[in-house]
Amino acid sequence: MKLYTAPRAPNPRRVEIFIAEKGIAGIERVAVDLNAGEHRTEAFLRRNPLGRVPVLELDDGRCLSESRAICAYLEGLCPEPNLMGRDSDERAFIEMADRQIEFGFFVPLMQHIRHTHPGFAPLEQPQFADYGAVQGVRMREAAATLDATLAGQAFVAGERFTIADITAFCALEFARLIRFRAGDAGLAHLQAWRDRIAGRPSVG
């Protein structure tokens, strides 16, 4: 298999951490230079018409995009260590937590950065600064909600590490582009959780 990736982008990082947690070896990496527009080339668009990374090219030539779909495929190949739920009950609650992080925190953060950060102007034309500012407020509200959740449990989806922690960690690390740090925002539980996750071998 081949993973088309961009090392500094948060969604590919989600998949990379998932792979590392699973201990999966033998996946070839193909770097895609987003700044050079390689994700818009005809060759890449044949693999993902939306022009986004990551993309997992399977051995039979089919291409799977979307970070969570790729992780679900890999979970099926390598069920242990389990990261997405051991039964339907646990899977539902882990997916709920993961989606709440993705749509409540990650997406507003991405829109905030894409519409306010000058470095993203080549990728986001036109930029809408007012929209980006509103998304920044929503992202911070979601971070505060996550901080409250982590005041009562060890991990994002409960009492063990799951894909929801990977999503939240990659989002929080990407927020460093706007100099957002949970501890500086008074979110002590979120900062302590971030520091624990940062110490995992899969993250380094």
Image: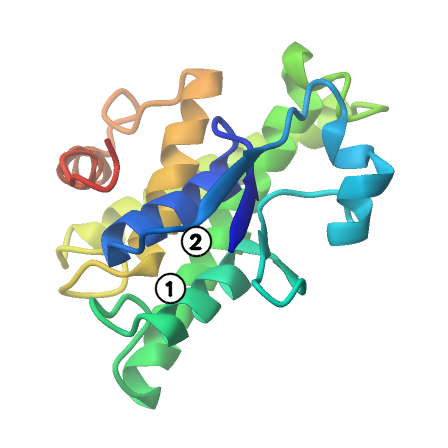
Q: Quadrant of residue 40?
A: top right
Question: Percent x, y for residue 137?
Answer: 53, 33
Along the viewing direction, whichever of 125 and 141 lies nearer the viewer: 125
| Mark 2: few/some/many CA within 10 Å (<14, 14-19, 20+) | many
- The residue shown at (47%, 69%) is 73
Q: Quadrant of residue 42?
A: top right
Q: Residue furthest top?
A: 118
Along the viewing direction, whichever of 135 and 109 lies nearer the viewer: 109
| Mark 1: few/some/many CA within 10 Å (<14, 14-19, 20+) | many
Mark 2: which secondary structure?
helix
- The answer to whether residue 170 is seen in the rendering is yes
Query: Label 1 sits on what residue type?
Result: Ala
According to the picture, the residue beneath numbered tag 2 turns out to be: 101
In the picture, the quarter occupied by the C terminus is top left
Along the viewing direction, whichever of 182 and 72 lies nearer the viewer: 72
Please indicate whether residue 156 sits to the left or right of residue 66 in the image: left
Above or below, comparing residue 96 to residue 163 in the picture:
below
Q: In which quarter of the image is residue 158?
A: bottom left
Question: Percent x, y for residue 174?
Answer: 44, 29
- The residue shown at (37%, 30%) is 173
Above or below, comparing residue 43 to residue 119 in the picture:
below
Above or below, comparing residue 179 to residue 20 in the picture:
above
Question: Percent x, y for residue 105?
Answer: 48, 45
According to the picture, the residue beneath numbered tag 1 turns out to be: 97
- Find residue 147 and name its label: none
Please indicate whether residue 72 sits to the left or right of residue 183 in the image: right
Please indicate whether residue 96 sits to the left or right of residue 154 in the image: right
- The residue shown at (37%, 64%) is 97
Q: Do the residues labelled 2 and 1 touch (CB within 8 Å)?
A: yes
Question: Percent x, y for residue 72?
Answer: 45, 69
